[in-house]
Amino acid sequence: MKIIDDIWFTSFMANIGIVIGEDEVTGERKAYIGVGDGFHLEVDRQMIATHGAKLSPEIAARIAALLNPEGDDHA
């Protein structure tokens, strides 16, 4: 899987990453979420891409809808 992008949420307690990757054969994109140690970006990215929990587009859309209940894209 080719990693396209990563998004990080860092707090005092953890470094949580979302890694978006693309299957090099099918072109299908998938996102995975997991915890990284915060010391080695590439190691964290690879670990989440291979062992993270799948984050579906439906769940991402549900989160976006809950954060933006009126459907206002400019909030």
Image (cartoon, rainbow, N blue to C red):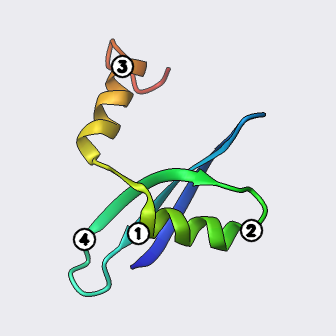
Marked residue nearer the N-terminal end (4 or 2): 4
Q: Where's the N terminus, which quadrant? A: bottom left
Q: Between marks 2 and 1, how big is the CA–CA gap?
A: 18 Å
Q: Earlier in the sequence, mark 4 or mark 3?
A: 4
Tell me where residue 20 appears, x and y as whole percent: 43, 62
- Look at the numbered disc 1 and give the secondary structure of its residue: strand
Question: How many residues crowd around disc 1 within 10 Å: few (fewer than 14), some, or many (20 or more)?
Answer: many
At horizontal 20% and vertical 81% (from top left) the residue drawn is: 26
Q: Is residue 27 above or below residue 72?
A: below
Label 3 packing within 10 angstroms: few (<14), some (14-19), many (20+): few
Which badge, 2 or 1, is on the more N-terminal residue?
1
- Determine the residue positioned at 62% across, 65% down: 44
Identify the residue position indicated by label 4 in the image: 28
Question: In this orientation, which residue lies closer to the viewer: 13 or 42?
Answer: 13
Label 2 sits on what residue type?
Answer: His
Q: Which residue is mark 1?
A: 21
Q: If you read the primary sequence from the N terminus, does the residue marked by circle 2 or circle 3 appear first?
A: 2
Q: Position of residue 32 (x, y in %)?
A: 41, 56
Q: Is residue 18 above or below residue 49?
A: above
Instruction: Name the mark nearer the viewer: 2 or 3.
Output: 2
- Contact (Cβ within 8 Å) of mark 1 with mark 3: no
Q: Is residue 32 left or right of residue 26?
A: right
Do residues under tags 4 and 2 come within 8 Å of each other at their CB atoms? no
Q: Position of residue 48 (x, y in %)?
A: 50, 62
| Mark 1 or 3, nearer chain start | 1
Who's the residue at 69% across and 41% down the image? 14
> Which residue carries the number 3 mark?
66
Label 1–label 4 contact, CB within 8 A: no
Callout 1 amino acid: Gly
Label 2, label 3: how far apart the Cα atoms are: 33 Å
